[in-house]
Amino acid sequence: MLRLAMRTLRLRKGGFLATFVAVFFGALIVAACGGLLETGIRAEAVPQRLAGAPIVVSGEQTYLMPRNDPESDSKHRQKTENATLPERVRLDGGLVGKLGAVPGVAGAVGEVNFAAGLMRDGRPVSGDSLGHGWDSAALTPFALTAGGAPSVGEVVLADGLAREAGVRVGDRVEVAAHGGVEGFRVAGVASAAQPVARGSVFFAAGDADRLSGRPGLVDTIGLFVSPGADLAGVESRVSDALRGTSATVSSGNDRAATEFPEAVASGENLIVLAAVSGGLAAMVAMFVVASTLTLSVQQRRRELALLRAVGTTPRQLRRMVLGEAMVVAVLATGLAGVLGPLLGHWLFDQLVSNRVVPSVVRFHQGWIPSVAAAGAAILAALVAAITAGLRAGRVRPTEALADAAMSKRWLTPVRLIVAVLAFGGGTALAIVTVAVMTGPVAASTAGPAVILWAVGLAMISPGVTKVMAAILQWPVRALSGVNGRLAMLNTRAGVVRVAGAVTPIMLAVGIATGNIYLQTTSQAVSDQAFSQDLRADAVVGSVAGGLAPDLVSRVQSVPGVRSASEYVTSTAFIQAPFDSGQNDDGWPVVGLTASGAAQATADKATQGRLDALSGDTVALPETIAADLGRRVGDTVTLRLGDGAVVDVRVVALTTGRPGFASLLLPADLLAPHTTSGLAPQLLVNAAPGIDAATLTGRLREVAAGLPGVVVGDRSVLVAAHKKKQDVGVWVNYLMVGMIMAYTVISVVNTLVMATARRRREFGLQRLTGSTRAQVLRMAGIEGGVVATIGIAAGTVVAAGSIVPFCLVASDSLLPSGPIGIYLAVIGAAAALALVATLVPTWAATRGRAVDAATIED
């Protein structure tokens, strides 16, 4: 039967080419997503600034967050979950001397990092450079190429930064750091032994300590190993010396995670992105491959029926269909395995260029993603081939020729069970979304519902097609006459064939509409919440790494200022009492100045007062306070973003927006526990009778005498928030677009294959009196009906996820976003269906009708 399968492959090139295309593109996309997944798991980067130190010691950036209440589960083992601390965890500088004394350590150097940008005429020359102490230059290593080491009031610049700024040894430069701008003399220029992504400004030890804002603390400690010492042994002794401290030890490429903590965070995001996109692509591929292969086999029913009539056993027939499918699948997956890494690398480059992934992260794609993609595609083809072969194999020889004309049986027990389970799952997710979820987080349950509804409708697609055809037949006949009558007769008679073309259109419309409107609604709700919660007529910012702590009092004294508040954002974890609603992302926290807190936020105090936010205090949203069982005057233990644990007293309960609730802390409590150590912005509100433009002008007059301070209106923060959201939007559109491209290929593939096989039918129709134009009009009407049914089913699929989400996120049945998105999606689907139907029909009717009518299928 394998020899027969190979011969039929040569004779049935069209059908098998369609199967090849479906399997190839499915495996290609899954392989590419697999490469992104592997890259995210590895999150591998090469150390740059720390490359010269064999061992690096840094603060522990993870927090073991309890996942169950220790009091209620006192008899059971406490469960924990790793949460990533978002702010830099620093080390006591005293550890440098201690580690330097460990046997096998030849030297220990503490390193501090802080934003340090060169300025020219009050504007930044480079905003992406870091300041360090000169002694940490050995960690790269940097070597002087001109001048000498810096003394107090002097700096050494990395050669690339010096060229960018156009300065030489002896020149005076202005450096913006720690909320201010100071003048320094360039003492020297240094070159790194290897490329370093960010520019470096080296200060004398005293200046570096002062400008870092963390005297006595270091970001990392680099250790040099004595000649002949065993690296692993030294690393083990260093770990022993650090026992009981919040420090970790790394070597090799693991040092890069210390230097580039954003690489680890991006790896986690990349894992989620690749897993979701790859899973969605795999599900779509299974449907497309199954639909294409099933349609291909159905179109050969006459051939298969003849084989049964001449003595072929059901087992032989199944083996032949299976052999054909496996040959095509192996060839398609083999090619996809070669090209998959190329697509994966291209996608990774797009993510890097749009700053979704840091440029220091390396792309990796080994053999496992390619094998997994090939296995998934081959499995889909195998299941589809077995399913398609079973129907033909069950036909008795005496019924074979009669049954070959048209397939009408479609609802099998397996289809029914899968449909019931899928619809049940989609309904359950909708209930959970509406009843349990709040805010944008509802997308985590609403999103997967798209696939479940699509699965359910795909299983009963022939039935849906039959019902829709019955509904559409009267308006179609009324509008298009005889051609419409013929089109509807063909559609209703070949309902299984038509359903094979409807399914990919339904997938395309459902996935595109559902995912895009989930994204636009999430973005609109987030932008609206941020804009409404942000109360400011003007914003004071800085290009010097933050604002000086005393600036808020100076701004408050400006005529026309009603209130001013520092504005600091971070993340915190509620450590006690146990918080069952907290996930590993913690809670967003906002730091405000007590005197201006009430005017700086839309959150209103229902109990207590926001102007009491001073010292170790907190204002809790009512929902969180209720879950914790806390009231005004009670104490809550927080772990802040840098790992510091503080006990804070509740001074107010607030009306936090569902899904956007934030804990409010005093700015002077929160800011020192952020990486920069300073408030990045001030929110300023105008006094009655003063408009925003007048206020902004007065603040700019004050800022003119403060180097590094800039003033803008509230649109500055809104635009920054929107830009941050746009990154997530772009990622979603990229991955959905890739899957949609595959679905579009499948739509064209299926419709072209279904139409091209009807050449004999079209020839017979022309011999009975129809003109070529009438055949084309009939085919166009059929394509329009297929598009209409697919669009209607796809709209139902999308609504199954969009409506529950919108009810929760925006209290509306309809999503946010222009109607043009939906019109573009359905317009593209209709155009594809018509073109993919009319073009092969035009090609099939080019020759003489008698020649076409005598062709064997």
Image (cartoon, rainbow, N blue to C red):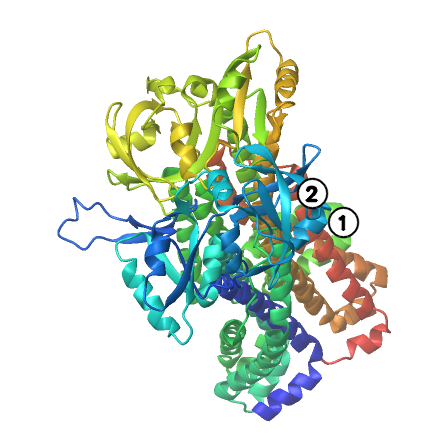
Q: Position of residue 620 (x, y in %)?
A: 34, 28
Amino acid found under the numbered disc labelled 1? Ser
Q: Position of residue 219 (x, y in %)?
A: 43, 49
Give the answer, above or below, for where 631 lies relative to 470.
Answer: above
Q: Which quadrant of the figure has residue 251?
A: bottom left
- Judged left or right of residue 317, residue 570 is left
Quadrant for the C terminus in the image: bottom right
Identify the residue at image location x=38%, y=18%.
611
Q: Mark 1 and 2 residues: CB-CB less than 8 Å, in contact?
A: no
In what element is the residue under mark 1?
helix
Closer to us: 598 or 481: 598
Quadrant for the N terminus in the image: bottom right
Dot 2 alpha-carbon crowd within 10 angstroms: few under 14, some 14 to 19, many 20 or more = few
Q: Position of residue 627 (x, y in %)?
A: 27, 34
- Judged left or right of residue 372, residue 26 is right
In what element is the residue under mark 2?
loop
Q: To which residue does mark 2 refer?
A: 171
Q: To which residue does mark 1 refer?
A: 480
Closer to us: 758 or 114: 114
Q: Which quadrant of the figure has residue 618?
A: top left
